[in-house]
Every structure is written in structure tokens, then in C-alpha cells.
Amino acid sequence: MHEVSAHAVIVGAGHAGGFAAAVLRQYGWKGPITLVGAEPIPPYQRPPLSKAWLTGGSDLASLLLRPAAFYAANAITLRLSSLVTDIDRANRSLSLDTGESIAYDHLILALGAQARMLSVPGRDLVGVFELRTMADADRLKATLRPGLRLTIIGAGYIGLEAAASARAIGADVTVIERESRVLARVASQRLSDFFQRRHEAGGVRIILDAAIEAFEGTDGRATGVRLAGGRRIACDAVLVAIGATPNDALARSAGLTCADGIVVDAAARTSDPMIQAIGDCTRRSLPLYQRTGRLESVPNALEQAKQASASLCGRTPPAPEVPWFWSDQYEVRLQIAGLLFDVSEGVVRGDPATGAFAIFHLAANGVVQAVEAVNAAAEFMAGRTMIAKRKQVAPARLRDMSSSLRELIA
Ligand code: FAD
């Protein structure tokens, strides 16, 4: 445990960093807390950026993690529009792009991730967007209008959510995906099929197995996308949504162990005992799955913020959580608990044709590893409990809608 009157500095004022500052205080940290962030706004939630924020259904107050006054009221010094450029571990000091330096006793890195860009010609054309920050979302939002021809590269969560939002505004949307199905990295084949059908029913054109060769433009403005093989998709704007890379360069140059993310343990500790790391910038252990991984999700950011704060304040670390994710597209609320590792074919409970169903994924020994729930909150909750308990459940019972979920988790 660290001296609770020491100076805790958190770098990255995003979801993980903002929450960690609040939880540190809640857990009894008495010393100064400084939260340094490169963006000009206090910590905010990114999930609405591809959903309600794009369609005009949410405002800044609802996006902020805490009201701006919260930080001063809790003796948390908020340094916005400030980029940390260097960590001097020997002297426990940070350099900022403003020329200032900040001394720390304990450091928490909550650096997040950045949108991956395609390295193809034309990526700098006006009208080629990415979607990670509120500023990105505002630029895209200002362009979206009925009839706009928007091409989205990438059929992951963010690409598909943006597709649904753009359709709600009346844009003409084409999604181009490199893999042979949508949500290929994060969902099962059945779920991919469901979402592809839903988007096509909503008027989205989906092109699979396609490689981007270039963005084309006239007078510096994007006018189309050229695919390998020569096919051209004419458009007025392009959104590149092909995933994110962890912001671990600052940690790497400070000599911390990184492997596509800052490597941390179950208390969010890095290879330096005075430095922890949390959220999208980390590679963490996944105790239920006996491997390490990167989890880019709000629940993970919150879990690791609690791990870091508990360990700093000498509290018992929280029990490991089952990883979970959500996505909202049209009227569909997708909730996924667990990870699709070592699973056999899924067991479907409910009828996908009704728009409400769940797919349970079991390991070869019958233990529930993951559940994908579509408008099925009860199945999601039950699945999460089964995964945490490492429950073995017979597929026939899961499939049978007359078997009660309460009995299945007991
Ligand atoms: P971030 O929130 O990215 O915060 C990191 C912050 O650190 C940034 O503000 C960055 O500017 C700052 N920073 C980086 N380097 C420095 C530096 N050197 N000095 C100072 N500051 C620095 N997750 C879900 O669970 N459900 C969803 O539905 C969902 N939807 C999403 C939709 C979109 C459009 C996006 C972009 C993400 C979505 N996510 C969703 C993911 C979720 O938002 C992230 O997992 C979460 O924000 C991670 O929090 P973080 O604090 O680790 O990173």
C-alpha cells in the first residue's frame, strides 16, 4: 500500500482516468490527486458518440462522467488540454507539452487508445473521418444530412453503430468490411448474420471480403473509395472505423513492459511498482480464460480503475469480473458477457426472427464461456452469472424456453 497522503497523478482524463480519480477519493486517498488530460473537456463517455450524440439525442451534460464542479469539490486538480510527453521514472516526474513538469509519488496511466487509420492514398482528404473523440464526432455530425452518401470502412461495433445512426438521419450508407462477415472479431457467425440482415433491412449496403486500395477525391475532397479489383464506390464522406490501437508509446519510451498495450497484473500494476495502468491502453490478465488480452470497454475501464484504487488505498482487491460489452443499433440492444474463447457451436434460446434471443457458448466440457443476448436482458444477466460460476449446463435445458433461468443458474 502507498502512503495515502502522497501525490497521485493520473494521466489521461477519459473514462478510466476520470473514474479512478473519483474512486481514489471514495476509497480514502487523502493526498493530492492531479488528473491530466490532453482533451479540452472533463472526462466524458464515448459510447454515445456513435449513437445518440450523432443523431442529436444527447447533450454535453449527459455525456460528462461527473459535473465539471465535482473535481474541485473533491480536491482533484484537473489539468485539461495538457499532453504528457515524458515520464522520468528515476525522479518521478512528468513533462508536459506546456513546458511544465509535475512530480508524482504514484502514477496511474489511463491513456486510452486511438482510432486506427488505413495507410492508403487519400487518407488526408477532407471528408475522411475517424471516430474516437467528441471533436471527431462533432465533425462527423456536422457533415451528416439526409441523402449524404456515407461510406463506412469497417463493420465492427463503431462502424455498425454509426451506420444505424446515419440511417436514422436519412444518409445513404454503404459499409465495407475486409472480413467475410460483420462483427467478425467480436461475435459469433449467427450473431453476425442477424446484424447483417438487420442493417440490410434498414437500407444499409454491406460489401464483404473487400480491401480498400485508395480514397479518391476532387479538389482535396473525398468523392469515393476504390477497392482492390478496381471497383469504385462513389460517396460524399468516408468514416474509417477499423479498430483502435492502445496508446502505450509513452509507457514504452519510459521502459515499462508493453506488448500491444501496457502489461498489467490484477491490481493494474505495471513493471514499475510506482506506476499502474488502466483501461484501453492495457494488456491485462483474463483470469476466467487463462490468457491475457486487451478489453476496449467501459466495464473494463471501471473494473481496472477500482483495482488500481483499491491497491493504492490498501483495500482488498475487487473480485475479478466477467468481461461484458454492449452495443445499441436501431431498436436492438446487444449485450455480450464473456469471451468467445475455446467454444463450440452456440446454443440458441429464443427465436432470432422475433428480434429477441440469446446464444450461449459452451466449452467442450459444457461450461458456459460466453452469452450473446439480443434484446434479452434476463438471458444476459443469467449468462453472466453462469460464466462467473463456471457452470456446466446441458444445451437442451438452455434451449428449452420453459426451463427457468433462475433454476439454470442455481
Ligand atoms: P479513453 O476514454 O480513450 O481516455 C483516454 C484519454 O487519455 C483521452 O482523453 C486521451 O486524450 C488522453 N491521453 C492519451 N495520452 C495522453 C497523454 N500523453 N497526456 C495526456 N492525456 C492523454 N465501450 C463500451 O463498453 N460500450 C460501448 O457501447 C462503447 N461504444 C463506443 C463508441 C465509440 C465511438 C468509442 C470511441 C468507444 C466506445 N466504447 C464503448 C469504448 C469505450 O469508450 C472505451 O473502452 C473507454 O473510453 C476506455 O476508457 P479509457 O479511459 O481507457 O480511454
Image (cartoon, grey):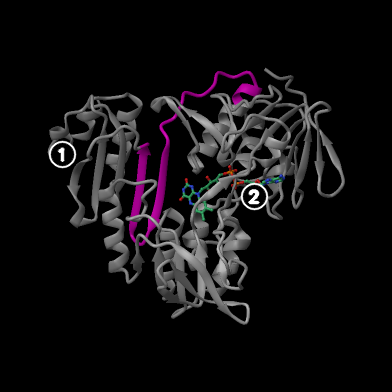
Tell me how far mark 2 sits from mark 1, CA to CA: 45 Å
Residue at 53%, 75% (x, y): give it: 216
Q: What is the x, y in percent for residue 13?
A: 67, 45
Image vertical order of residue 52 relative to residue 389, above or below: below
> Which residue lies under the disc numbered 2?
67
Q: Which secondary structure, mark 1?
A: helix
Whether residue 56 is visible here, answered yes or no, is no
- Amino acid on which disc 1 is placed: Arg
Which quarter of the rendered picture does the C terminus lie within?
top left
- Amino acid on which disc 2 is placed: Pro
For the residues labelled 2 and 1, say whether their Cβ atoms are less than 8 Å apart: no
Q: Which residues are magenta?
A: 310-339
Give the total of numbered labels. 2
Residue 38: within the magenta? no
Q: Nearer the viewer, residue 275 or 46?
A: 275
Q: Residues within 10 Å of mark 2 (few under 14, many from 20)?
A: few
Q: What is the x, y in percent for residue 9?
A: 74, 34
Q: Which secondary structure, mark 2?
A: loop
Residue at 39%, 62% (x, y): give it: 210
